[in-house]
Image (cartoon, rainbow, N blue to C red):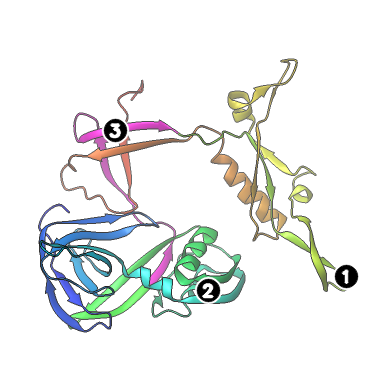
Amino acid sequence: MAGAVPTLHWFDRFDERIGVLAVAGALVHTEELGGEDTLEFECRDVPAKGDRLVWHDDLDGRWREFVVVRTDEPLEGLCSVYAESSLCELLDDFIEDTVLANATATRALTAALANSRWAVGACGELGRRGCWLYHVNALAALRRVCEVWGGEASGVITVADGRVTSRTLSIVERVGAWRGARFTYGKNLARCTRTVLEDEVYTALYGFGAGLPNVDENGNWTGGYRRKLTFGSVNNGVNWVGDEQARLAWGRWNADRTAKVHSFGQVTFSEIEDPTLLLAVTRAALADCTQPKVSYDIDVALVEGDVPVMLGDTVAVIDTSRDPE
């Protein structure tokens, strides 16, 4: 972690204050959007598994709370500590069977956190969706809600009188923003690797929805399911969507080389029961498949000026190997 090591306020698993845990050397904070959020460091004192570490992140002005999940304790020398964001406590909260239908993101998040001590914050207008939360822990349910509603989880820890007083989660359209950060090799990039990924390029997609239940003339379920939902009824009888420009660029010749044909893929949205919505999300999925995916893996030597770089931000990477750059 760049700059001064933050003060780690040390609590036991029941939020009773122990003191300050002094770090010996560097403290490494690793955070990934929708994934890993960990601390690693060494210290002379030995925290117990489940102890809480609360610290103030001066970069974004937020309080953060972590749970000690592993310690390496040699007979001589420093103790190595590995801690995870307090979101990991959602692994201990269980959801038996909750069906969400035509629900808002707020309703879905409320269901995911129903058995936890985390409060539900303000959620973005992400439309109405549905999913089935069955025999999962609350953290898996949270990830599922983010996936189905197309949002990202954002947590807020409130500290007052020297201890955590509230833990709140929201589902927002996106975490981060564009703040103007630009990285160029030879200037503020120490390393840059461009990778063309192995994902297939498709110029047309079939879209499938939920398996439709068998019902009688009164609409009562009679057991079993029919074929999956398609959208041909709202797409001129065609159950796929295609991109003509992509076909010309990334399709392939037919057998006698007289025409370029589509490269077909398929996507399934098992919670969708409306053909119009299925058509819309399949079109959106196609837009992400019609050209090769490229990733950039970079090491940033420094951030110029006063431009901050935070989790989820969009940044500009100037690829000097391309012409034009």
Q: Amino acid at mark 2?
A: Arg
Q: Position of residue 148 (x, y in %)?
A: 55, 60
Q: Which residue is mark 2?
A: 107
Q: Which span is picked out in magenta?
A: 169-196
Label 3 Cα crowd, 10 Å radius (few <14 / some 14-19 / many 20+) = some
**Rendered image quadrant of residue 242:** top right
Q: Is residue 19 magenta?
A: no
Magenta span includes 172:
yes
Q: Which residue is mark 3?
A: 192
Majority secondary structure of magenta residues = strand
Give the tally of numbered discs: 3
Residue 221 is left or right of residue 43, and the answer is right
The amino acid sitting under disc 3 is Cys
**Residue position for label 1:** 216
1 versus 92 height, above or below: above
Q: Residue 88 falls in which quadrant of the image?
A: bottom left
Looking at numbered disc 1 in the image, what kind of residue is underneath it?
A: Asp
